[in-house]
Image (tube, rainbow, N blue to C red):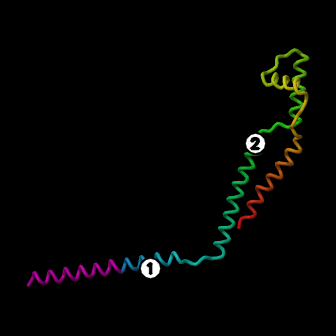
Amino acid sequence: MGKNLKQQKNRNINLFYCLKFYSILILFLLAGGNSAESQEYATDRMFMKHYKKTKCKIEAEKIIRKIKKRPEMNLEQEVLLIQNIWVKLRSNLPLSPGERKLLQNLKEKGNVSKKIRSKEIWKRKSYQFKDIRMKCNQIR
């Protein structure tokens, strides 16, 4: 009789643990399902929109900084470089390889420059910067 009572207690304990396990599992699944259907507030959408715009503006400013740092020779710099070459020639100072090459081009082709003034370069760049920044304002 002791053996029979022990088996019945084991069944009750196993049944109790099974019920406990399945009830926890069901609660866990229900809690997971409710979080997927959570309510979306208007402030969440506004925050995400603002976050995307801010992120875009940061990236745009990085691109603009890179463009600003990129060296570009303008007409005024080229004129000063040519003047420097003529001064060196008159005073019999040695020319660097780049200056010799520029002098050779001047002798062959004359003073044909495709460079533009710094004011025009910055005007072009400012339009380019505006376009880059405007793309961020169009994010919805």
Whether residue 17 appears in magenta in the rendering, the answer is yes
* Of the pair 34 and 72, the residue shown nearer to us: 72
- Residues at circles 2 and 1 in contact by the CB criterion of under 8 Å: no
Toward the front, the furthest residue is 108
Residue 92: quarter of image: top right
Q: What element carries label 2?
A: helix
Q: Identify the image quadrant of the C terminus.
A: bottom right
Measuring from the top left, give residue 7's x and y in whole percent.
15, 81
User: What residue did someone put label 1 on?
Assistant: 30
Measuring from the top left, give residue 35's x and y in whole percent.
51, 75
**Circle 1 crowding by C-alpha within 10 Å: few under 14, some 14–19, many from 20:** few
Q: What stretch of residues is rendered in magenta? A: 1-22
Q: What main secondary structure does the magenta stretch of the protein show?
A: helix
The correct choice, above or below, for 90 with respect to 73 in the image is above
Whether residue 14 appears in magenta in the rendering, the answer is yes
* Of the pair 15 and 120, the residue shown nearer to us: 120
Question: Which amino acid, mark 1?
Answer: Leu
Query: Image check: 34 left or right of 9?
Result: right
Q: What element carries label 1?
A: helix
User: What residue did someone put label 2 on?
Assistant: 69
Measuring from the top left, give residue 101's x and y in whole percent.
81, 24
Q: Identify the image quadrant of the N terminus.
A: bottom left
Question: Which amino acid, mark 2?
Answer: Lys
Question: Is residue 95 visible in this depiction of the protein?
Answer: yes
Residue 40: quarter of image: bottom right
Query: Image check: 63 left or right of 13?
Result: right
Residue that appears at 69% across and 66% down: 50
